[in-house]
């Protein structure tokens, strides 16, 4: 995913957190903030130290990024959102990661209706 699709600065993370607009399941939490007029969505990914060592955390982040890349056409463009992996996300297969992340994105109304599989 290109850099223009990422939220990297701590101040931007905090701005999204402060909206207190979140949806969660057992594996992931998604915070979102509406940004009308934005050309495309932006996403921040956070995997805490409760999830294994650096290798495991990077592995989880890669799976989240890959899932977002696969559902990118269905994602709304007028929103910034954060995906936070809970400790239960460690060790998920790619299929389980995608299933759980798509579930929480649907609950947050971040996916268009055409993504209902």
Image (spheres, rainbow, N blue to C red):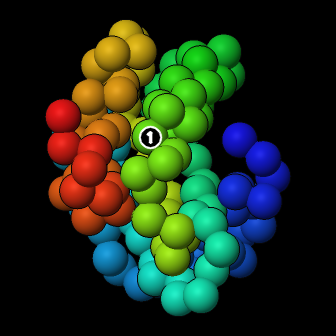
Q: Is residue 54 visible?
A: yes
Q: Nearer the viewer, residue 15 or 102?
A: 102
Quadrant in which the C terminus is drawn: top left
Residue placed most toward the observer, 22 or 110: 110
- Residue sticking out furthest to the front: 114
Q: Position of residue 59 (x, y in %)?
A: 59, 18
Q: Residue 108 lies in what quarter of the image?
A: bottom left
**Could you tell me which residue is drawn at 44 percent across and 65 percent down?**
76
**Side of 50 relative to 106 (left or right):** right
Question: Is 51 positioned to the left or the right of 44 in the image?
Answer: left
- Which residue is the site of mark 1? 71
Tell me where residue 6 appears, x and y as whole percent: 70, 56
**In this rendering, position of residue 28 left or right of residue 69:** left
| x and y, in percent, of residue 66 in the image | 56, 28
The percent position of residue 73, horizontal first and vertical second, equals 49, 48
Which residue is at the front of the view, 90 or 1?
A: 1
Compared with residue 25, is residue 7 higher up or lower down, i.e. above or below? below
Among all residues in the image, which is located at the extreme right? 3
At x 33%, y 38%, the residue is 101
Q: Residue at x 71, y 41 (%)?
A: 1
**Of the pair 79 and 112, the residue shown nearer to us:** 112
Name the residue rendered at 33%, 16% in the picture.
95
Q: Is residue 48 above or below residue 13?
A: above
Mark 1 closeness class: few <14, some 14–19, many ≥20 residues within 10 Å: some
Residue 49 appears in the picture as rendered? no
Q: Is residue 81 left or right of residue 93?
A: right
Q: Secondary structure at mark 1?
A: helix
């Amino acid at each position: 995913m290109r850099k223009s699709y990422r939220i990297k600065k701590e101040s931007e993370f905090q701005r999204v957190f402060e909206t207190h607009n979140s949806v969660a399941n057992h594996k992931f939490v998604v915070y979102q903030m509406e940004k009308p007029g934005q050309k495309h969505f932006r996403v921040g990914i956070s995997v805490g130290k409760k999830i294994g060592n650096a290798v495991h955390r990077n592995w989880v982040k890669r799976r989240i990024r890959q899932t977002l890349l696969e559902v990118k056409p269905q994602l709304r463009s007028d929103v910034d959102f954060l995906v936070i992996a809970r400790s239960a996300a460690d060790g998920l297969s790619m299929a389980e990661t995608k299933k759980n992340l798509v579930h929480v994105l649907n609950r947050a109304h971040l996916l268009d209706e055409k993504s209902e599989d």
